[in-house]
Amino acid sequence: MRKLIWILIFAAGCASPQPPAVNVHDGRGYCALCHEWHDESQMRWPIEYKGRTYRFCDPNCRVAFENNPEKFLKDPRFNPGAGSEGQGDGK
């Protein structure tokens, strides 16, 4: 029964619209934890930090960010405006 509940929670999270995020642009999102670009639909683990929303490709990436957010906010692909402007070359 517990497994079924988790599956239903996961399915509900996947189906719900995701909030706009700092690290998602033009249908693609950059996950600073795994250093990869993903389709926007894969970036379904949001978190709000200092009034800004960031989305992650995996719940483990989100937890790692929660444990040390300042480490990852230095990457301009993840946090535009944190250094050089823009989101890189998208690769």
Image: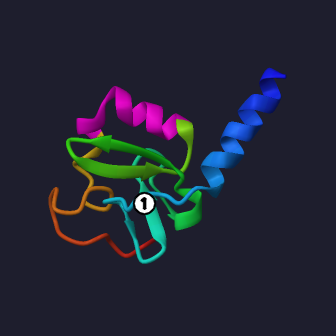
Q: Is residue 68 left or right of residue 4?
A: left
Residue 74, percent from left and from top: 22, 48
Q: Is residue 53 above or below residue 59?
A: below
Q: Is residue 58 left or right of residue 35?
A: right
Q: In the image, what residue type sits under mark 1?
A: Tyr
Q: Residue at x 42, y 77 (%)?
A: 26
For this rendering, which residue is in front, 24 or 31? 24
Q: Quadrant of residue 82?
A: bottom left
Q: Is the N terminus in the top left, top right, bottom left or bottom right quadrant?
A: top right
For this rendering, which residue is in front, 15 or 43? 15
Q: Secondary structure at mark 1?
A: strand
Q: How many badges with numbers are in the image?
A: 1
Q: Is residue 1 above or below residue 22?
A: above
Residue 31, percent from left and from top: 44, 53
Q: How busy is the neighbourhood of tag 1: few (under 14 within 10 Å), some, or many (20 plus)?
A: many
Q: Residue at x 15, y 59 (%)?
A: 83
Magenta segment: 60-71
Residue 64, percent from left and from top: 43, 32
Q: Is residue 38 magenta?
A: no
Q: Residue at x 61, y 47 (%)?
A: 13
Q: Is residue 67 magenta?
A: yes
Residue designated by label 1: 30
Q: Is residue 54 left or right of residue 11?
A: left
For this rendering, which residue is in front, 10 or 78? 10
Q: Residue at x 32, y 71 (%)?
A: 88
